[in-house]
């Protein structure tokens, strides 16, 4: 029987910055056009965090029952470790999706955009079928596409739209930037897991590209994301705050390009998560000022 602390660990809290960052950027973009709304922002944050926890539990369940989590480096796996029954982990996933759904309905009520409920349904389906179902798209090298669309474009632009009733160019650039960092976060995780994914038949984008090209893609995505954030200074000079991330970008990229592997990539994974959160804070504040 898993303890409360193990359930928290199984939710993979280090991935939560990937959920918070797009909301911060989207809110900053809304504030930039004088359309900031506390209630909508907090509801959007709640939806994003609940979806992230849900997808983490869903991945734990699906990978666990498939046997692809039996020999992994990284966070605790509840299903594969036997600490929790598969049905319990699946239930936790759908409970998290349920929380996201309730908050999503509230967000639609506050913003008046009820058609966004359909987008919410797509988000839950994308979260589940990332590793769930008969043909999970995360096993076919499309995981980064899902992450970019839902934890980049949808989360950021949706946050801006529910507050400002429109999207802006800074919100679009920020959405692409956040999406690329989220992709980089997934990529470095999958670079670490290439040896076990190959054995398990999991064809992630890192496996398809190969170790060398996957590492270069990780570096490219981080650099382009920072440049897109800096480009937002065209609309608000304070967005230039993102330039302070140039040094952290180098510090994250160097060990990956140097060939760090296995447990040596765990600090890079954690650092990329904090990098994304910092990006969201700096760009969000920069656009809002």
Image (spheres, grey):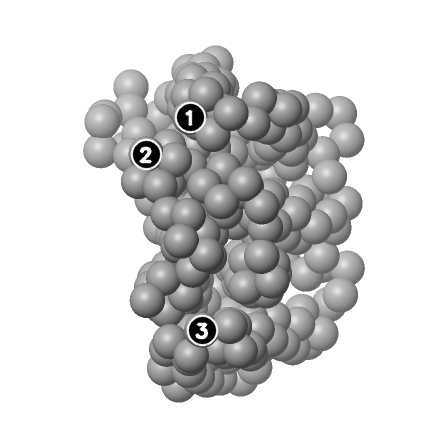
Q: Is residue 276 left or right of residue 66?
A: left
> Which dot marks residue 142?
none
| Residue for point 47% across, 30% down | 111
Label disc, if present, on residue 110 of the rendered structure? 1
Q: Few, some or many C-alpha atoms within 10 Å of disc 3 (few <14, some 14-19, many ≥20)?
A: some
Q: Element under label 1?
A: helix
In what element is the residue under mark 3?
A: loop
Mark 3 or mark 2, which is nearer the start of the sequence? 2
Q: How far apart are marks 3 and 1 (CA)?
A: 28 Å
Q: Is mark 2 on a helix, strand or loop?
A: helix
The image quadrant where one finds the N terminus is top left
Can you give x and y, in whole percent of width and height, for residue 143 in the image? 67, 47
Residue 236 badge: 3
3 or 1: tag closer to the N-terminus: 1
- Residue on which disc 2 sits: 39
Q: Is residue 126 visible?
A: yes
């Amino acid at each position: 029987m898993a303890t409360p602390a193990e359930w928290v660990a199984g939710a993979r809290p280090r991935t939560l910055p990937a959920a918070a960052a797009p909301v911060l950027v989207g809110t900053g973009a809304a504030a930039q056009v004088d359309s900031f709304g506390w209630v909508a922002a907090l509801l959007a944050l709640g939806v994003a965090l609940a979806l992230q926890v849900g997808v983490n539990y869903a991945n734990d369940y699906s990978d666990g029952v498939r046997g692809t989590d039996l020999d992994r480096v990284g966070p605790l796996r509840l299903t594969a470790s036997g600490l929790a029954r598969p049905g319990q982990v699946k239930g936790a996933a759908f409970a998290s999706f349920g929380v996201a759904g309730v908050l999503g309905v509230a967000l639609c009520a506050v913003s008046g955009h009820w058609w966004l409920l359909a987008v919410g349904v797509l988000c839950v389906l994308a979260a589940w079928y990332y590793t769930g179902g008969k043909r999970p798209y995360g096993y076919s090298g499309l995981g980064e596409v899902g992450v970019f669309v839902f934890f980049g474009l949808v989360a950021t632009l949706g946050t801006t739209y529910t507050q400002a009733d429109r999207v802006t160019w800074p919100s679009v650039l920020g959405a692409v930037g956040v999406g690329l960092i989220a992709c980089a976060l997934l990529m470095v995780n999958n670079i670490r897991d290439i040896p076990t994914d190959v054995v398990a038949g999991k064809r992630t984008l890192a496996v398809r590209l190969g170790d060398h090209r996957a590492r270069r893609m990780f570096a490219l995505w981080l650099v382009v994301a920072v440049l897109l954030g800096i480009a937002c200074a065209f609309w608000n000079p304070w967005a230039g705050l993102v330039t302070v991330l140039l040094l952290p970008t180098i510090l994250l990229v160097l060990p990956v390009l140097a060939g760090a592997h296995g447990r040596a990539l765990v600090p890079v994974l954690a650092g990329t998560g904090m990098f994304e959160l910092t990006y969201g804070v700096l760009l969000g504040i920069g656009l809002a000022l």
